[in-house]
Amino acid sequence: MTHSKNLTPTFALMKKLSPLIQCNDLDTYEKKFGYGNFDVMCKQQEGEKTIFGDEEIDFSSSTLRELANNLYDYFYEGYEVWIRETPEIVNGETKMSEDSMRYAIALEADNIDEDEAILSCRIVSGWLVLSAVYDATVKQRRKFYISLGMNHHFKENGIFSIGPNSDDWFRLRNDEVENLTKQKVLKFTINHPKNSSCSHCEKKQNTMKEKLKEYREKETEENYFQIQEMLEKLNSIKDHITKSEFNEKMKTFSELNSYFSERYEKYISLEEEYENALEEDVTLYKCNLCKKITCELMYEKRVCYDCKHNLFDSIAKEKNYDLEI
């Protein structure tokens, strides 16, 4: 199985042969011009034997249609497929006319299309040499499919869709830009600042400190004295009111006392939380782009997520991708 490679020679050859035969027109082409006769060599790119035995397999004076199943398997197993027109005489000139190259490229592109692969193409000593690329970038696939009129990879509005799920196009574009973002971030130097303060932690501590101050000044002491005054007043009038009236007032007092007790417990809890925050040992990071120091999670421990998204957007813009993030 061939992996992503420099396909510049492929697209240069396809441009030279333009306009190419569209895959949907292959049947029409074959009815008009026939299937042709070709010599085909399948060579293992790594020069190793595979499940088929030899590192090189030859087919003489055959049609590419009748070899379709064989070539599909050889492409998948990493073979390069060398194709030439069968010479009219033994040891005749090795050549491929431009029409034959257009036909072979379109036919083999259609042959491996179910795996969402594209072809790498080049000319070597008169042979057309093809191999399958199974992890081409989205940009490479789009360019290849457009050249051969493989419109089933596009929705009606022209949006590229790889595979049966049209939403895969957005996923694949996001994945590609995400990988490029990660590669760029990995080039940055990790920066763990020492003896630095985190603005996020400081903001959190200051907020807690303000709440504590508010509870202490406006709630705690004030409420304590208010409750004490109410209790003293109830005791002073106890002998001057009926038992039912006293019980009713005590009920009100108990509810208010319970409310203020809860608030006091909350104050104590907040005070403990604040003290723990002051003593907390946190890992600090320094963003390699905006230089902000923070204890928050960093992307690859190198950049803050705001900068990550900005970097992601800039790479998408460079590639002219309108991404749905």
Image (cartoon, rainbow, N blue to C red):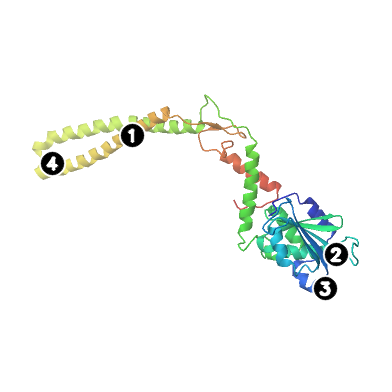
- Residue 154 visible in rendering: no
- The residue pinned by badge 4 equals 246
Q: Quadrant of residue 21?
A: bottom right
Q: Is residue 322 above or below residue 203?
A: below
Between tags 4 and 1, which lies in front? Answer: 1
Task: Return the x and y of residue 287 as percentages of the image width and height.
Answer: 58, 34
Tell me the residue at 45%/33% (across/down).
204
How far, Cα to Cα, is label 3 from label 2?
13 Å
Between tags 1 and 3, which lies in front? Answer: 3
Between tags 3 and 2, which lies in front? Answer: 2
Q: Nearer the viewer, residue 91 or 18?
A: 91
Dot 1 or dot 3, earlier in sequence: 3
Q: Nearer the viewer, residue 146 or 45?
A: 45
In the rendered structure, the answer to whether residue 58 lies left or right of residue 302 reads right
- The residue pinned by badge 3 equals 34
The reply to whether callout 3 and callout 4 are in contact (CB within 8 Å) is no
Name the outermost residue toward the front. Answer: 53
Between tags 3 and 4, which lies in front? Answer: 3
The reply to whether callout 3 and callout 2 are in contact (CB within 8 Å) is no
Dot 4, crowdedness within 10 Å: few (<14), some or many (≥20)?
some
- Residue 194 visible in rendering: yes
Q: Is residue 324 above or below residue 157?
A: above
Dot 4 or dot 1, earlier in sequence: 4
Mark 1 belongs to which amino acid?
Ser
Task: Return the x and y of residue 126 as percentages of the image width and height.
Answer: 87, 57
Mark 3 belongs to which amino acid?
Gly
How far, Cα to Cα, is label 1 from label 3?
87 Å
How far, Cα to Cα, is label 3 from label 4?
111 Å
